[in-house]
Image (cartoon, rainbow, N blue to C red):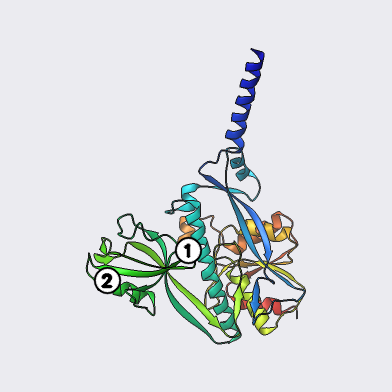
Amino acid sequence: MNEKRFALKILIIGLIVYLLFFLQIPYYVERPGSAVVINDRVEVDGQMDESDSQYMLTTVEIFKATPFSSFFQFLPYHSGVSEIDLLGNYEDYSAYRTLQRYYMDYSIHTAKAAAFNEADFPYDINYEGVYVMSVSEESNFFEDLTMGDSISKIDEKSFDNTDEFIDYIASKSIGDTVTLSLERDEESLDVSGELILIEETGNPGIGITLVTQSSVTTSPEVTIDAGNIGGPSAGLMFSLQVYKMLMEDFDSTLEVAGTGTIAENGEVGRIGGIDKKVVAADREGASVFFAPDDVISSQALEENPDLKSNYEIATETAEAINSDMQIVPVQHIKDAIDYLNTFD
């Protein structure tokens, strides 16, 4: 009898441990990630930056919570987000990661363009088709297409931009069969199906949501390896690293971190989780942190009076953790370049 009671207690304890510490729930926790040195991730004309300065992109770590780890959201610079709020319309975390990889690919190309723009070097933007972001269950391609597929041709026809791609489909009739040429995991495929009525437009369509796929060709050639990091927020730091190597400029020994999206014209955009990225940069010993100085509209402030710019949040965070980092506001890549040039 005692042995049975002991075994039952062990079973109950094991079940409690599993439920508390190992059972994943539809909830995620975000916390400071890392500050990743990118000197060896960017090559210009086959060469890496071997100077003493370090440029770092910053990340937010996201992990799926258990009942126990969900309480981590109450720690400083941690936050919780429900699965539906994080993933949106995407069915699982894998699909979400595919989207984040697209954003990173896009930011890499715009970073090249922004750096070459600022350095007054020529470059070419090459249209390569569209990425599939989602497929409607009503689509006749539902079984054949998947998120992340890259469609380069329709009926063996190439296009110069996404508008031409969409116009070609709109010129067809509902029920017409089209053949899509695509790439998936470095494999070339052709899939065919009938067009359906897109109720929102009244036009025939494939039944997908899509985004433009393009690349930037430069001379000298630039390659950027983001590894497994996703999202668009490394754009500013990648563009600064490329510009530095093109111009051999601001060769100080600064350890520079930062964040922000980048547009082809050099404008820097707002990102999420900047407080966590400031903490990550401080832990890695950065001396400078570039923060987007986004302008909050009066309408946005009316709707959310507590809304603050990335720069304001970054400054408050640095003060709260007693960081010695210099928080520098940037609205354009030139703002960061001008600041770095003060250390020549």
Q: Residues within 10 Å of mark 1 (few under 14, many from 20)?
A: few
Instruction: Look at discs 1 and 2 and give the one toward the viewer.
Output: 2
Coordinates of residue 84 in the picture (x, y in percent): 46, 48
What residue is pinned by disc 2? 170
> Which amino acid, by three-letter code, is at mark 1?
Ser
Q: Nearer the viewer, residue 311 or 182?
A: 182
Q: Earlier in the sequence, mark 1 or mark 2?
A: 2
Q: Residue furthest top?
A: 1
Coordinates of residue 140 in the picture (x, y in percent): 30, 59
Q: Which mark is residue 298?
A: 1
Coordinates of residue 218 in the picture (x, y in percent): 56, 83
Q: Nearer the viewer, residue 211 or 15?
A: 15
Q: Seen in the image, is 321 located left or right of residue 238?
A: right
Q: Nearer the viewer, residue 272 or 197?
A: 197
Between the residue at mark 1 and the residue at mark 2, the CA separation in whole angstroms equals 39 Å
Q: Quadrant of residue 196?
A: bottom left
Coordinates of residue 38 in the picture (x, y in percent): 67, 69
